[in-house]
């Protein structure tokens, strides 16, 4: 049973930083992509960033490029999202998701963690 558990959300002032973590378990992820999505109130869920588990290749949404960094912890099955220079528009529930590189849809999702950026 694959489980993705997010942590690290909270309240921060604009310009501040937060680090989100996604602990993955239940299988080997060598042929998987792990991504972060977010959903703000009244808006559709949007892609934030993703990382290839095996190649560590990363890809970012334009809205976070240069401010957010996604990485994988070699010591454990954890994917982190370092968020710097946060803006009020970054306020959302952030979700960790995973899919096989052979699939187009993300099949595993975490429960989400709230990030609130005050102005």
Image (cartoon, grey):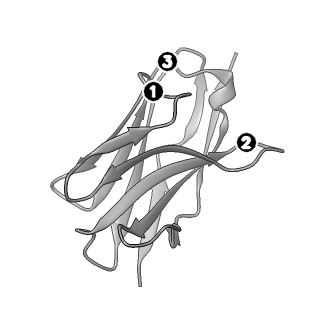
Quick one: quadrant of the C terminus?
Answer: top right
Q: Can you identify the residue that label 1 sits on?
A: 65
Q: Give how far across and how far down residue 85 sits, in percent.
A: 49, 18
- Comparing labels 3 and 1, the label whose residue is closer to the camera: 1
- Comparing labels 1 and 2, the label whose residue is closer to the camera: 1
Q: Which residue sits at x=32%, y=66%? A: 32
Q: Element type at marker 2?
A: loop
Along the line of sight, which residue is nearer the eye, 3 or 107?
Answer: 107
The label number, if any, that marks residue 110 in the structure image: none
Q: Earlier in the sequence, mark 3 or mark 1?
A: 1
Along the line of sight, which residue is nearer the eye, 39 or 33?
Answer: 33
State whether residue 79 is above or below residue 12. below
Q: Earlier in the sequence, mark 2 or mark 3?
A: 2
Q: Element type at marker 1?
A: loop
Q: Give how far across and how far down residue 89 sits, in percent.
A: 68, 26
Quick one: quadrant of the N terminus?
Answer: bottom left
Q: Which residue sits at x=64%, y=26%? A: 117
Tally the numbered discs: 3
Q: Give how far across and how far down residue 69 sits, in percent.
A: 36, 33
Q: Can you identify the residue that label 3 sits on?
A: 85
Q: Which residue sits at x=67%, y=34%? A: 91
Mark 3, Cα crowd under 10 Å, few <14 / some 14-19 / many 20+, is some
Mark 2, Cα crowd under 10 Å, few <14 / some 14-19 / many 20+, is some
User: Which residue sits furthest bottom?
Assistant: 1
Mark 1, Cα crowd under 10 Å, few <14 / some 14-19 / many 20+, is few
Q: Which residue sits at x=73%, y=42%? A: 40
Q: CA distance from mark 3 to mark 1?
A: 11 Å
Q: Can you identify the residue that label 2 sits on?
A: 40
Along the line of sight, which residue is nearer the eye, 37 or 114?
Answer: 37
């Amino acid at each position: 049973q694959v489980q993705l558990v997010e942590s690290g959300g909270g309240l921060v002032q604009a310009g501040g930083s937060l680090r989100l973590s996604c602990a993955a378990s239940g299988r080997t992820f060598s042929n998987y992509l792990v991504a972060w999505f977010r959903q703000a109130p009244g808006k559709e869920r949007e892609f934030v960033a993703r990382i290839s588990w095996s190649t560590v290749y990363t890809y970012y949404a334009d809205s976070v490029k240069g401010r957010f960094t996604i990485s994988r912890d070699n010591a454990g099955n954890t994917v982190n999202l370092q968020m710097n220079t946060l803006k009020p528009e970054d306020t959302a529930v952030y979700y960790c998701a995973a899919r096989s590189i052979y699939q187009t849809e993300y099949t595993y999702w975490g429960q989400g963690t709230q990030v609130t950026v005050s102005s």
